Amino acid sequence: MTLTATALPGVPEVRPGDDLAALLAGAATGECALREGDVLAVAHKVVSKAEGRVRDLADVRPGERARDLAARHDKDARAVQVVLDETAERGEGFLADLVAEWEGATQAAADAGVRVVTTRTGLVLAASGGLLKRLLPIYKAGIGGKLGSGRQYQSWISLADELGAIRHILQTHSISGPVNLTGPEPVRNAEFSKALGAALHRPALFPTPVFGIRLVLGEFADQGALASERVVPRVLLESGYQFQHSDVRSALAWAVAH
């Protein structure tokens, strides 16, 4: 089995003879207070490059081989309390539009008979990056706490399970289409904050007001940190994936220790 993992830009080309191709392009939203138009301009460039790689994948496909494309992106944000699996209707807003465009970039491969999987990644828990990296200094100083009301759901996944799930998808040929890469038990932000404080043996008593979040994250605050995403990984569970960290406390304890 031959695997090509591509991470735009500057990625290796898909070659004849490759069995699997994982396209791991993407970025976390809300890393800084950018305007919506700024992010879309960058995103469109990434989508265009992704389309080129997908066309390469379709062109080199021999009829007797199966191929996979795992496209990593952030799930669209919706301020809802209902449980969302892979069959849920798409949300509204520019992030939902971006997700639709990103997933649409894989159509050429699907049309060529390639098995395409588009992964929808939640909040990846790793001390080395993402939101957790930004939260750790605050919590270690003992001034962490819930964001806004703390009632919004957060759909998380440990980095170990993010990688494990991608491997599971590549090796499970019955899986195709959208797959949520999130833990099986999404939690409200207030519970997440308490769990992070417990993992660091620190209190989590200092809430961040909504205006402060909007000041730091700009237009992404309401579609990111303050949005409610109660997403569940139905496809992963039904296909037999065994989570290493099935609850947020064990995931955070693992993340801060690695």
Image: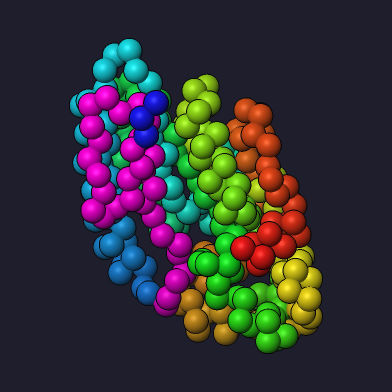
* Quarter of the view holding residue 45: bottom left
For the C terminus, the quadrant is bottom right
- 103 left or right, relative to 44: right
**In percent of the image, x 46 and y 77: which residue is there?**
218
- 13 left or right, relative to 71: left
Q: In this view, does 125 lie above or below 209?
A: above
State the residue in front, 87 or 194: 194
For the question of whether residue 241 can be seen, the reply is yes
- 7 left or right, relative to 49: right
The percent position of residue 241, horizontal first and vertical second, equals: 64, 34
* Quarter of the view holding residue 134: bottom right
Q: What stretch is highlighted in magenta?
A: 4-33
The percent position of residue 249, horizontal first and vertical second, equals: 76, 59
State the residue in front, 59 or 97: 59
The percent position of residue 90, horizontal first and vertical second, equals: 50, 45
For the N terminus, the quadrant is top left
Q: Is residue 173 above or below residue 192?
A: above
**In percent of the image, x 37 and y 34: which residue is there?**
3
Q: Residue furthest top?
A: 64
* Residue 168 drawn in magenta: no
Secondary structure mostly seen in the magenta stretch: loop
**In percent of the image, x 79 and y 80: which residue is there?**
203
For the question of whether residue 152 can be seen, the reply is no
**In percent of the image, x 33 and y 50: which residue is there?**
7
Q: In this view, does 62 lie above or below 127?
A: above
* Residue 8 drawn in magenta: yes
What is the number of callouts on the image?
Answer: 0
